[in-house]
Amino acid sequence: MVAAEKKYSLDEYLTREARSLYKHEFYNGKIVRMAGAKATHNQIAANLTGALKYTLRPLPRKFIVYNSDQKVYIESENVGVYPDALVVCEEPQFWRGREDLIVNPLLIVEVLSRSTAPFDKSGKFLLYEQLPSFQEYVLVEQNYPKVESWYRLTEHSWDKTVQIEPNGFIELRSLGVSLSLAEVYEYVSFKKP
């Protein structure tokens, strides 16, 4: 006989997460420990956060950039996850006033690894899509220069843009700006296959 896996409430998860040395994501009662990221992943995520902040600062509209320590909560699915970066337009909205759970991301960034890419490209995308504020999903390869942007046209219709040129730019339509791949991959050395 196999024991049933314990299901946790969101409050139990948040209490455990506040005391934990490691980050965990929450999937409707299931707590999943996140794998540690490697230096290349962290460098790309830091580059993106910095480039977004620098690029958005002079715009007349207020955009707030968050790094990978900010959880996004998808209430309709009872899911709390940590994207690698996210941008909120004007003011963040928090689930029930909890500052650890943002519910209104405009743009979300995931830096892909071999182990996370399949879920980031499909499962997480479907989860994020449930958020009405969510307009753009940016997927960044860490092993070679490639950035994909998925921009929401209608509720379930998305337009994909891909940039693979190391000196090219990726347009972020939800923000009205472009980022250079040179900025995204600054200080990153790609290994030869």
Image (spheres, rainbow, N blue to C red):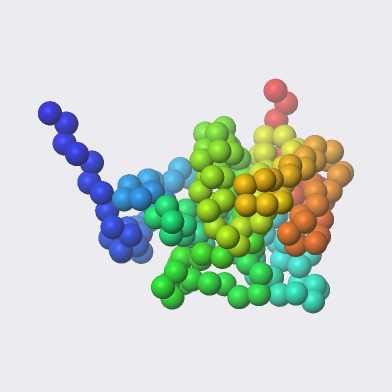
Left or right of 180 in this view: 174: left
Pick the residue in front: 52 or 73.
73
Which residue is farthest left? 1
Pick the residue in front: 16 or 173.
173
Quadrant in which residue 67 is drawn: bottom right
Left or right of 169 in this view: 42: left
Seen in the picture, residue 152 relative to 65 is either above or below; the reply is: above
Residue that appears at 76% across and 67% down: 56
Residue 85 percent across, percent down from the top left:
61, 57
Residue that appears at 67% across and 39% down: 141
Residue 79 percent across, percent down from the top left:
42, 53
Residue that appears at 80% across and 41% down: 163
Residue 133 percent across, percent down from the top left:
60, 62
Regarding residue 7, the answer to whether it shows in the image is yes
Q: Quadrant of the N terminus?
A: top left
- Count of numbered tags: 0
Pick the residue in front: 166 or 25.
25
Residue 135 percent across, percent down from the top left:
66, 56
Q: Quadrant of the C terminus?
A: top right
Regarding residue 22, the answer to whether it shows in the image is no
Left or right of 71 in this view: 65: right
Which residue is farthest top? 193
Seen in the picture, residue 168 relative to 132 is either above or below; the reply is: above
